[in-house]
Amino acid sequence: ALAASAALSSPLLAQAKPEETAALRDAALTDTVAWDITEGLTTEIGPRLAGSDAEARARDWAVARLKALGFSNVRIEPFEVPYWERGEASAAIVAPYPQPLVLTALGNSAATPTKGLTAEVIGFDSLDSLKAADPAAVKGKIVFLTHRMAVTQDGSHYGTVGKVRREGPSVASKLGAAAILIRSIGTDHHRAPHTGSQSWSDGAQPIPALALANPDADQLERVLKRGKPVTVALKATARMAGKRLSGNVIAEVPGRDPDAGIVLVGGHLDSWDQGTGAIDDAAGVAITTAAAKRIMDAGQPLRTIRVVWFGSEEIGLFGGAAYREKHKGEKHHLLAESDFGADRIWRFQTSVAEAALPAMKPLAAALAPLGIQLAPRNGDASGSDISEIQKLGIPVIELGQDGTRYFDLHHTPDDTLDKVDPVQLRQNVAAWTALLSVTANDPTDYGPVPPGAH
Amino acid sequence: ALAASAALSSPLLAQAKPEETAALRDAALTDTVAWDITEGLTTEIGPRLAGSDAEARARDWAVARLKALGFSNVRIEPFEVPYWERGEASAAIVAPYPQPLVLTALGNSAATPTKGLTAEVIGFDSLDSLKAADPAAVKGKIVFLTHRMAVTQDGSHYGTVGKVRREGPSVASKLGAAAILIRSIGTDHHRAPHTGSQSWSDGAQPIPALALANPDADQLERVLKRGKPVTVALKATARMAGKRLSGNVIAEVPGRDPDAGIVLVGGHLDSWDQGTGAIDDAAGVAITTAAAKRIMDAGQPLRTIRVVWFGSEEIGLFGGAAYREKHKGEKHHLLAESDFGADRIWRFQTSVAEAALPAMKPLAAALAPLGIQLAPRNGDASGSDISEIQKLGIPVIELGQDGTRYFDLHHTPDDTLDKVDPVQLRQNVAAWTALLSVTANDPTDYGPVPPGAH
Ligand SMILES: [Zn+2]
Ligand SMILES: [Zn+2]
Ligand SMILES: [Zn+2]
Ligand SMILES: [Zn+2]
């Protein structure tokens, strides 16, 4: 009985006391570090396209800032990426009702011929109806996909409509389309088209692939419904431009026990080039870094906290894959990423061993005062960059922001600093501080997570 | 006594019975004509820049639609306008933090040299501080004006900040500035710059004059506040391109008494070219036309109703001036214009003879059930195009829409059909129907209005 009691009390001694976690959490509600990082990165660097000179400047900026904040082992881990440039895009309805349309290229879009291309438009209301189309009806035409995105608190409709963006261009290309226009994957009503990644599946010849702003998609749909043939002229100069250097920026808070495994937190440093990447994802690196600094300043944690500002997430999770290859031999205790803006966190999800679920209770207790509930189902937690690392079977906890307005802004020119609410940003820092206080000091193992559990 | 009674009863007989006005007003709450015009004009024509081919197509569209609706004397009254083309505009901060800025040219802006111009930025927080500047400090620089617009229900702050747009470029030019950037005259937080008219005062050499989107103005302000010299590169291809034909489109509901004077209602057919001019001002011509049709269909009114879709309002009230010159010899009973979007009408203002104020009571009674109050002060009613005609001393009644979100959209690419709320649009038609039912049948003279009364 004595021996058993000692075995139990040893981990308990390592755990953060609930009142210490609560004090750290509440102090974080006055945080200024996250705002300063978000403001600084979006102002002094601005847009940070994967592989661009701006992304390289952002890495240097990150290194300087992380060192100034007092982190250890601050470094850049470089890797190469294919470099895609957006160039310019313009379009106009030529007939029956001449007028311009606002649109932008999707990642990996091809250019039009220099003088542009003009073709008839054929509309489809879903990816499935495009897949079922007669190639003879599509050949040489401009395909237009008119799906609509629903507003949800958890952003779950992105999974469904995001597929249209990711797969539609390859399907259209294989059917012989001259180009493809998709309705923006977004919930707003602004002339701000939503870009995003797509890649060409095997055998699909790259064609111009662009997203119309939602009011322009509405307009083209109304024009098509008039029943007359609709001709559109397109110009796009998007192009692949060789290989460029990208990189992950890493900083650490060394733990008392180097063998206890790493708690990895972070977000991505790169952004699409249309906005300044404030909500996607300057806020994410800022929130996680500010929380890690608070834990560092409160005394050395049991486990090492590793903060990663991933590079080249937007164009295909290159930073996550590079990290996995380089660090797959190291012991990771937990992964947690912030890449869904900075509005209020309302729930947290887990992808941990079933046996570790009781260990989530202290975290749930620490997050509850912030209005954050544990989601009932284990296995749903993930992240964008960390999805690559998660494949190794490492536990994940996901703090979920309210996504009600996220897809109004996501991947548009409107992703700018004014969209970050400082009050909600501080609630995020408080939640992440609580997460780190509990998990970096908890000797309980949260794994192993069975393959395919998330 | 008998004679006096007859003199009184004759006007009373001509007046619309309150219950008839109420029935017409309430029936208008199911109107479809205003939506059809707004939808049709913005979809089938789209942007309608003054003097452009699109504005000419819009006039033909208007004639066909007004004839189809059954109006009399449908015609185009042409006039010439100076034609200004927006061209393209791009800008970037070159130093210290390289990144693009979103902006657009103001009306009558000059172009930059073909290769662009690069200069240091000098910021001013008001037109007055620019006016007080040392020319040596401004010479060769890019002036940046950072005023902010307040949200108001009545849009009254437009008068104050609109002056910055209208006068700032001439002041900057006279001080030797290479170019001027103003913060958009608007209340939104989108990458959608607000264009608008400005004209060069005597002795002011045209220079590039552009409006930054509000997030970009925020950004440039933040960068300037860092205290380092800020250099911006600009390119703009805006240009004056000779004279073009514009015109007013006119339609009538002939009154029973051709000598009773005209009730003129309308809005403007032209729009800025960035959006499709839905709230500014397809909705205005649509609302007034739909109301006039309802009166026409209910039986011949006492006075002739003349519906005017003015041309070339945006570039300097050319349609209003052309109308005044052509029609100044005709008797006008009343002028009323809709050019403030299509959100709920909440008040009405008057510019009538003091003696005519009692005659406003039946109108106030007819509008009250729609939630519309008579503004306490006489003399404030006006309108954009009709301001030119109002100078002749003709009475004006102004139905005021709620302007809370108007300047989020005004003169931006975001002025598109989705911004028109069909329910509020119908409330507008109901209010205008009540206005016409009362005033086109009221034998009371509302004038004369003393000069300078508004
Ligand atoms: Zn992201
Ligand atoms: Zn993203
Ligand atoms: Zn207007
Ligand atoms: Zn206007």
Image (cartoon, coloured by chain):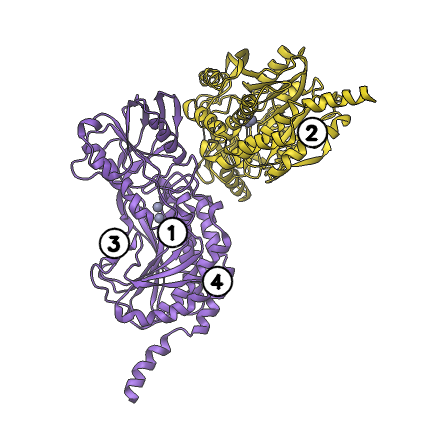
Chain colours: A purple, B yellow
Circle 4: element type:
helix
N-terminal of the pair, mark 1 or mark 4, is 4
* Cβ atoms under marks 3 and 2 closer than 8 Å: no
N-terminal of the pair, mark 3 or mark 1, is 1
Q: What's the chain of the residue with tag 4?
A: A
Q: What's the chain of the residue with tag 3?
A: A
Q: Disc 3 designates what residue?
A: A388
Residue type highlighted by circle 4? Ala
Residue type highlighted by circle 2? Thr
Tell me if the residue at label 1 has its CB under 8 Å from ligand 1: yes
Q: What's the chain of the residue with tag 1?
A: A
Q: Disc 4 designates what residue?
A: A28
Same chain? Circles 1 and 4: yes
x 19%, y 29%: residue = A176
Q: What's the chain of the residue with tag 2?
A: B
- Residue A340 is marked as 1
CA gap, disc 3 to disc 2?
68 Å
Q: What x and y, as percent, mark residue A271? A: 37, 44
Circle 2: element type:
strand
Q: Disc 2 designates what residue?
A: B350
Circle 3: element type:
helix
* Cβ atoms under marks 2 and 1 closer than 8 Å: no
CA gap, disc 4 to disc 3?
30 Å
Residue B251 quadrant? top right
- For the residue pair A438 and B284, the one nearer the viewer reads as B284
